Image: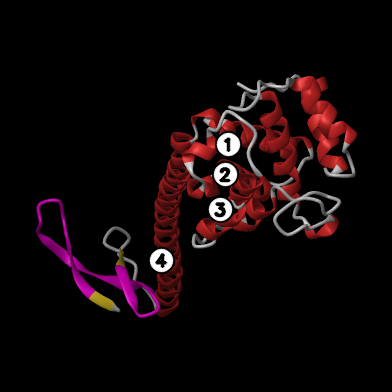
Amino acid sequence: MQHDVPLRNHLGIEVGRGDAAIVAVAAGRDVLGCLCVDNLRSRRRIDARQTDLLRVFGAAFGQFCRRARAEADLRRNEDQLARHLAQLRTAFEQITHALASTVAVRDPYTAGHQERVTLLACAIADEMRLGDDTRAALRTAGVLHDIGKLQVPAEILSKPARLSAFEMQLVRDHVQAGRDILAKIAFPWPVAEIVYQHHERLNGQGYPRGLAADALCLEARILAVADVVEAMVSHRPYRAALGMDKALGEIRSHRNVLYDPAVVDACLRLILEKGFAFP
């Protein structure tokens, strides 16, 4: 709108009259402010064309302000969401490791086994150039792959002699127990199934279901190789450590029989050519 306004000199004394135009800076029905233009210096009239231009400018500036505010709000929301996701990720990892540590408490001979298996499994995934999602699934499943041993009597886990057939079956049941525990958790990856399959073998001679070939998920194939290698190079109550040479001989001789050939090849390259070693 236009107004007839007084023209005043530097002393505040009125010396004439002039025009001023005020247009709303708006976005839709939201008024964000106003734009005031006057001719107190030039004393020229503000005509209808100029007023229309001011209205267009006010509307455009209003949209610009609304978009700028929306983008600022979005950035704040994105930053806040990123912080929340980081906090959730940290909490998730802490809970995962807390669950895994309960197994180590009951079975001190395999303390660190899950972490070392996870380390090798993730390194194999990197060597095979698999995606971040596969690596994340392996990291979680690896740390938790023996959680089912919570249901195995501690005296069996630490028995310094060969297990009986009945005791061996109790130990083998840890994969089913692990699946039952982990299936209750809504992981973003099939962690329970990976843990359930990590003692299956390519030719169907593993346990508990005798799955073979394409029925085995890739993460379980990787975890199987990492688990065997780590177990053979580590001390157990019923035997001394067998050493890396025997561990690599095991996966090499059963390549494409018990173990996935691509996984075996990646593991061999890591250890023999790239110097991978357990901490």
Mark 4 → mark 3, Cα distance in angstroms: 53 Å
**Disc 4 residue type?**
Arg
Q: Disc 2 designates what residue?
A: 146
Say which amino acid is labelled 3.
Answer: Gly
Q: Secondary structure at mark 3?
A: helix
Instruction: Specify whether 251 is left or right of 53.
Output: right
- Give the camera-side residue of 92 and 175: 175
Q: Which mark is residue 66?
A: 4
Look at label 2 and name its amino acid: Asp
Counting residues from the N terminus, which is met first, the one under dot 1 or under dot 3? 1
Residue at (49, 60) in percent of width and height = 185
Find the distance from the CA under tag 2 to the CA under tag 4.
55 Å
The image's colouring method is secondary structure
In the image, what residue type sits under mark 1? Answer: Gln
Pointer 1 with pointer 2, Cβ within 8 A: yes
Q: For the residue labelled by badge 4, is the local secondary structure a helix, a strand or a loop? A: helix
